[in-house]
Image (cartoon, grey):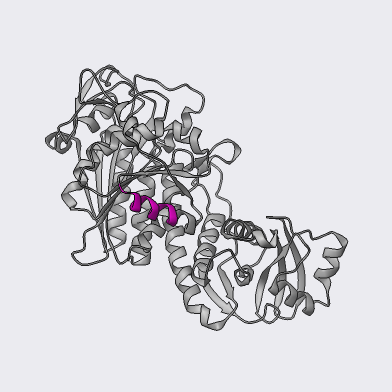
Amino acid sequence: MRLYSVSGSAARQRTDCAIVGLYESGSLSTAAAQVDAALGGRLTRLVKRGDLRGKTGETSMLDVEAGPVSRVLVVGLGKKDGFKRKQYKKALQVAVAAVAKSGARDAVSYLSQEPVGDTDAYYRGRLAAEAVGQALYRVPAIRSSRKPPEPPLKSFAVAVAERDQKKDAERGLEHGRGIAAGASLTRDLANLPANVCTPSHLAKTARELAREYRSVRTQVVDEPELRRLKMGSFLSVTAGTDEPAKLIVMRYQGAGKQAPVVLVGKGVTFDSGGISLKQPVGMDEMKFDMTGAASVFGCIKAAAEIGLPLNLVGLVPACENMPSGRATKPGDIVRSMSGQTIEVINTDAEGRLILCDALTYARRFKPAVVVDIATLTGACVIALGAHLSAVMSNDDELAAEIEEAGRRAEDRAWHMPMAEEYHEQLKSNFADFTNSCGRDGGAITAACFLAKFTDGMRWAHVDIAGTAYLTGTHKGSTGRPVPLLMDFLLNRR
């Protein structure tokens, strides 16, 4: 897909499809007014008749064949004073989806000429590229029938109000293209079934990234080495399965000897709950329990595509959590790589058991910052629903950076507390602490558990249990929080 920027009047730009906006008040966007004048007031007449209403997300494709413009797609923008990042991105997604269903080979979006909250040309370009990637994404379905044909749309432009904004818009498009590519990889991995996307498949994908990009190096640590590293907590989770566990290490080199940012992603490729077996309803969705890992893969790919001027390390502890005669039992005590002992109260609280050893391993890279990403707790879904990810940290400034990045990227997160009282809930009579202490404050106590392995590090934990995937008829990975993480990284330069 070719992405580029243009300037000038919507009535004079040659394109198969001009995308213009209409507000609920009946007010035409700047570009829509230009097209309306060229069409002798056709859009105004349709608005007056009630055929065009401007409701958020509504689209109407008009065949105009007027001068250089073949089609006009009118997109509802909602209330003019409420047209912000979220509404802008949604309008673009529905617009691209509508254009993709037509025969248009190219399109120009003039929505980027409208005032969009507190954005600039860079962010309007970047959000547009991300929206294009999201709208054109197709789930890698495993079917016997032929794949549907690719849409004819091959190029997409965003219009700028002033010619001197083109450079910023082009930079935003380039960054958005990379972020969209990373989010698509995240979605591909997360959407695959667990009998395909195993720890070994993730390791293979990591090696493929290293072959594709010279800036990426991959190392895979197998179980014998995990035992030598004394990763007893990680290995306790994988004890019940025949699939071998992997610790995947991806290193992206985008700067000199700068201390890296380490991203740690939970990679449980299927979570049955182990001996603390989950309910059957919805258990198929536990293939998404590796979305934290998938988001690390997505960030490494996006960084390589963009040429991010930072050093990154992606750590992915990958395994299955299955019940068997060898599986870890509730009440068992395991020793982590840090030497701390853990009483396993609930084998379904397994994500923190693999992440804690990966966090200890991260110390060897002398990181500037460590961020772990995980579909960690159902309690996070209860707290924040499917709309916001949770951020918890031992550094309030770092948490604020991540929260602000989510706002800019329209991939929002919320800073949750980690007060001393929550840490006390993890006390054990038999070990240094337990891995679970019930439902109350579950998302916070899970973060408090991880914090026990982060002394001396600037660390943040992002719980994406509610935002990583959709359920129901639209079941599938969302690609989140790749946009949030990449905005965080891009703004660390």
Residue 483 placement: quadrant: bottom left
In the rendered view, would you say 70 is above or below 373?
below
In the rendered view, does 32 fall on the left or right side of 476?
right
Q: Residue at the spot x=25%, y=19% of the render?
A: 326
In the rendered view, would you say 313 is above or below 289?
below
Does residue 225 appear anywhere in the picture? yes
Whether residue 399 appears in magenta in the rendering, the answer is yes
Does residue 355 appear anywhere in the picture? no
Give the number of callouts.
0
Give coordinates of residue 140: x percent, y percent.
48, 47
Q: Residue at the spot x=73%, y=64% of the render?
A: 22
The C terminus: image quadrant: bottom left
Residue range (magenta): 395-405
Q: Name the magenta segment's main secondary structure.
A: helix
In front of the other: 258 or 109: 258
In front of the other: 421 or 60: 421
In front of the other: 210 or 464: 464
In the rendered view, does 451 fall on the left or right side of 227?
right
In the rendered view, would you say 281 is above or below 156?
above
Q: Residue at the spot x=52%, y=68% of the render?
A: 125
Give coordinates of residue 314: x percent, y percent.
28, 50
Which residue is the extreme one toward the right? 49
Give coordinates of residue 419: x percent, y percent.
34, 36
Whether residue 477 appears in magenta in the rendering, the answer is no
Give coordinates of residue 236: x percent, y percent.
24, 27
